[in-house]
Amino acid sequence: MIERCICLVCLDAPGGIELNDTNMALQLLHGGGHGKNGANRWYDKSMQFVVGRDGVCGTVCEHSPFDGIVLVQCTEHLLRHMKESSKKLVRADSVSELPAPRRLRWKCSPEIQGHLASSADKLQRIVKNLDFTVYKFENYGKEFIKRQRTSPDAYIQVALQLAFYRCHQRLVPTYESASIRRFEEGRVDNIRSATPEALAFVKAMTDEKSSVTDSEKMLLLKEAIRAQTEYTVLAITGMAIDNHLLGLREIARGLCKELPEMFTDETYLTSNRFVLSTSQVPTTMEMFCCYGPVVPNGYGTCYNPQAEHILFCISSFHDCKETSSVKFAKAIEESLIEMKDLCSKHNTVTAKPPTKQEKTPKPQEAKKL
């Protein structure tokens, strides 16, 4: 029955927590551990619709079948229908035609009981290890960025590079998902945001002994945003490197006795350890998306730019002493404020927003939940 079902509805007991964004996101991700609703998740299913008695509701998806943008569009369609439909929401006739629900009876041997107990312990360790916060930056949103005649996504990506450098004094391989759904069977490719131009900008912004003037920093910011925008356009039009190299590597697995040296070289391996895994998932309804890090010493950073604020969902692991989601959120705040101050002082662009013809092509990014 479970294997055949398309999706699952998880009816949660009250979590007994304050219903803020961070706690509600954690409730969806792991249910609060095995002592709460952790056993009420089925992570191998494509979609789980979670409805809690305390009002927490959302969707958990497994990333393999589809991308975040699909989930967002589906959820926003449902929310919009509920909000804007002139008709009252009534039970459809088709519901009564469904088979009556029946309880599944489980037969658990002592061996299975042992597996259940060890799985519960493992889940609890994972739950305690996740360092997660939802941070709402309220100083400004995408409307200010657009007035600088700049892509909000490229601007935020450069801010993330500055924030990471501020925390760790280096840049790292960075993943930003780029939708290639314009192609048949297209999914995502990778925008590599840790560019040489971004490095030059963040060094100028953080070096207290630097003699770089504010006007020069502004030029470096524009160069970093330009490089980010150009790579974004390459990625969403099928011209990035990651899917191409992945395809070659998988072909080589089938044709070669040993993988070509390029794919075992430490530089290639390091370049695919994405310490900073990011994604823009914009929404038009009151909702947001989040996910975990992809490496033990990394951050997961999903962001949702709105007109007058930007919402960041930041994750890392407590086991890693180098990372801290709260400190990274603080660094993002400082970086965005510094960049605004720089733009306000030295950008001569008028406050008029760009015209349709002047706007930079905007990717649709998505990420797993």
Image (tube, rainbow, N blue to C red):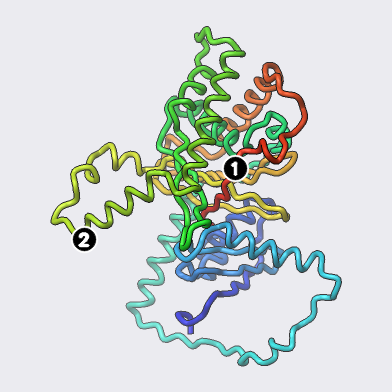
Q: Which residue is mark 1?
A: 361
Q: Is residue 368 visible?
A: no
Q: Position of residue 10 (x, y in %)?
A: 59, 72
Q: Could you say which quadrant of the image residue 312 lies in?
A: top right
The mark tally for this picture is: 2
Earlier residue among tags 2 and 1: 2
- Judged from this view, the residue extending furthest toward the left is 257
Q: Is residue 76 visible?
A: yes
The answer to whether 201 is drawn above or below residue 142 in the figure is above
- Judged from this view, the residue extending furthest toward the front is 357
What separation in Å lies between label 2 and label 1 (alpha carbons)? 37 Å
Q: Could you say which quadrant of the image residue 154 lies in?
A: top right
Report whether 208 appears left or right of 11.
left
Where disc 1 sits, the SS reads: loop
The answer to whether 307 is drawn above or below residue 290 in the figure is above
Q: Who is closer to the viewer here, 140 or 329?
A: 140
The answer to whether 218 is drawn above or below residue 7 in the figure is above
Q: Which residue is mark 2?
A: 254
Amino acid type for the residue under numbered disc 2:
Gly
Residue at screen point 36% across, 73% down:
114
